[in-house]
Image (tube, coloured by chain):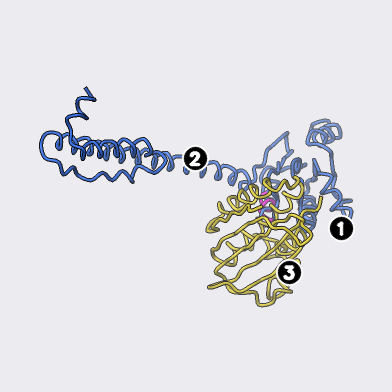
Chain colours: A yellow, B blue
């Protein structure tokens, strides 16, 4: 399986493009509708994060296989923004990478500060790595049903 | 006549013509720009003819390239329009006045955190502006939502109540129902209905449709 696609993320329209890219890989792999929808949320949250915090970047999606030959998808979200001050905090719902967010600011921020939380809930692994000129978030999700 | 032409021509011309015809026949596969036919270094009328044909082939190739470029551009534009259509549908959060003082917020596509926050502000504004008494959020077709997003929907319903209206959720998928139960999200304050029709019918029966 060598399904692989990538797309740049510069403006909100690209969020939808990223999801279309995902759709192709997921279809090739024969993922079910529910799992496809879960991954769509993952890609959407990662793409919005690029626009919100990373200025611009790109999303690469490819099919992978576990050591036990289970099929899965790897999503790599690269951006040009600064790294996380505290990743552990960023993964907590209602917090950014510096700590809790005032709920009254959520409308202005256009988010619940739980996007990465959702990504974690719908994936099997998440890693943040340094990338030239920015950072990259690598998540994997293997097929369940 | 063509036989005559070949018999009269020099072997150079013959080779060139064959070469040209071959590359012309394969132009679609190899690309029209590869049609590099050198100027005929043959003197006389045949040379002129050859140069002329050669010029025509190059012009034809250029036109073909241009046509292909236009086609690509058009396809690209169409695909952009299609993407924009999806984006607009999802980003605009349409609110429909179904009945007097009854609003409906149909939700399609993927519900993410950004969108759920946008939807809440739009719905709350509409409740006030249209003086709504009842709002139905129709999530038929949404298979999956993150627990925090579901939780946010409950909060949205509570906020609608604070504004003096009621909020019902219609079309909850089995998957989302499981999320709600397994995460222990308190849905007791939110009326739920199988379909949009049920939700509307329930309201009409209760109020006699008088609002």
Label tally: 3
Task: In the rendered structure, find residue A88 and report the number of the disc placed on it.
Answer: none
Q: Where's residue B2, x and y in %? A: 23, 25
Q: Where's residue B57, x and y in %? A: 27, 37
Q: Please tell me whether mark 1 sits on a helix, a strand or a loop.
A: loop
Crowding near pointer 3: few (<14 within 10 Å), some, many (20+)? some
Q: Where's residue A41, x and y in %? A: 70, 54
Q: Residue at x 14, y 41 (%)?
A: B42
Location of residue B183 (image quadrant): bottom right
Q: Is residue B211 left or right of residue A75?
A: right
In this picture, which residue range is highlighted in magenta? B117-122
Q: Nearer the viewer, mark 1 or mark 2?
A: 2
Is B136 included in the stretch rendered in magenta? no
Q: Is residue B105 left or right of residue A68?
A: left
Q: Please tell me whether mark 3 sits on a helix, a strand or a loop.
A: loop
Q: Is residue B72 above or below residue A65?
A: above
Q: Please tell me whether mark 2 sits on a helix, a strand or a loop.
A: helix
Where is mark 2, residue-wise?
Answer: B78
Crowding near pointer 1: few (<14 within 10 Å), some, many (20+)? few
Where is mark 1, residue-wise?
Answer: B183
Q: Residue at x 10, y 36 (%)?
A: B44
Is B119 included in the stretch rendered in magenta? yes
Q: Nearer the viewer, residue B134 or B71?
A: B71
The reply to the same-chain question for discs 1 and 2 is yes
Q: Which chain is mark 2 on?
A: B
């Amino acid at each position: 399986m060598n399904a692989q696609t990538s797309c740049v993320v510069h403006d909100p329209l690209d969020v939808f493009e990223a999801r279309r890219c995902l759709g192709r890989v997921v279809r090739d792999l024969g993922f079910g509708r529910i799992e496809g929808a879960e991954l769509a949320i993952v890609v959407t949250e990662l793409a919005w994060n690029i626009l919100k915090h990373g200025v611009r970047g790109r999303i690469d999606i490819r099919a992978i296989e576990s050591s036990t030959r289970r099929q899965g998808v790897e999503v790599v979200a690269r951006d040009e923004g600064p790294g996380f001050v505290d990743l552990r905090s960023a993964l907590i719902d209602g917090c950014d990478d510096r700590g809790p967010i005032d709920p009254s600011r959520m409308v202005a921020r256009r988010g619940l500060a739980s996007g990465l939380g959702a990504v974690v809930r719908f994936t099997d692994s998440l890693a943040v790595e340094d990338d030239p000129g920015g950072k990259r978030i690598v998540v994997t999700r293997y097929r369940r049903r | 006549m063509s036989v005559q032409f070949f018999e009269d021509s020099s072997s150079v011309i013959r080779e060139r013509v064959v070469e040209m015809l071959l590359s012309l026949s394969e132009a679609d596969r190899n690309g029209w720009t590869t049609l590099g036919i050198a100027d005929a270094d043959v003197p006389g009328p045949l040379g002129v003819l050859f140069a002329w044909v050669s010029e025509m082939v190059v012009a034809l190739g250029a036109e073909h390239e241009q046509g292909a470029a236009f086609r690509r551009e058009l396809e690209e534009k169409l695909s952009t329009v299609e993407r924009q259509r999806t984006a607009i549908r999802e980003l605009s959060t349409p609110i429909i006045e179904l009945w007097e003082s009854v609003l409906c917020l149909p939700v399609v596509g993927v519900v993410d955190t950004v969108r759920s926050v946008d939807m809440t502000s739009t719905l709350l504004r509409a409740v006030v502006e249209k003086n709504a008494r009842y709002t139905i959020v129709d999530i038929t077709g949404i298979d999956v939502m993150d627990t925090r997003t579901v939780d946010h929907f409950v909060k949205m319903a509570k906020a609608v109540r604070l504004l003096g209206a009621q909020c019902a959720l219609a079309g909850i998928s089995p998957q989302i129902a499981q999320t709600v139960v397994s995460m222990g999200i308190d849905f007791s304050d939110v009326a739920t209905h199988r379909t949009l029709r049920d939700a509307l019918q329930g309201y009409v029966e209760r109020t006699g449709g008088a609002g």
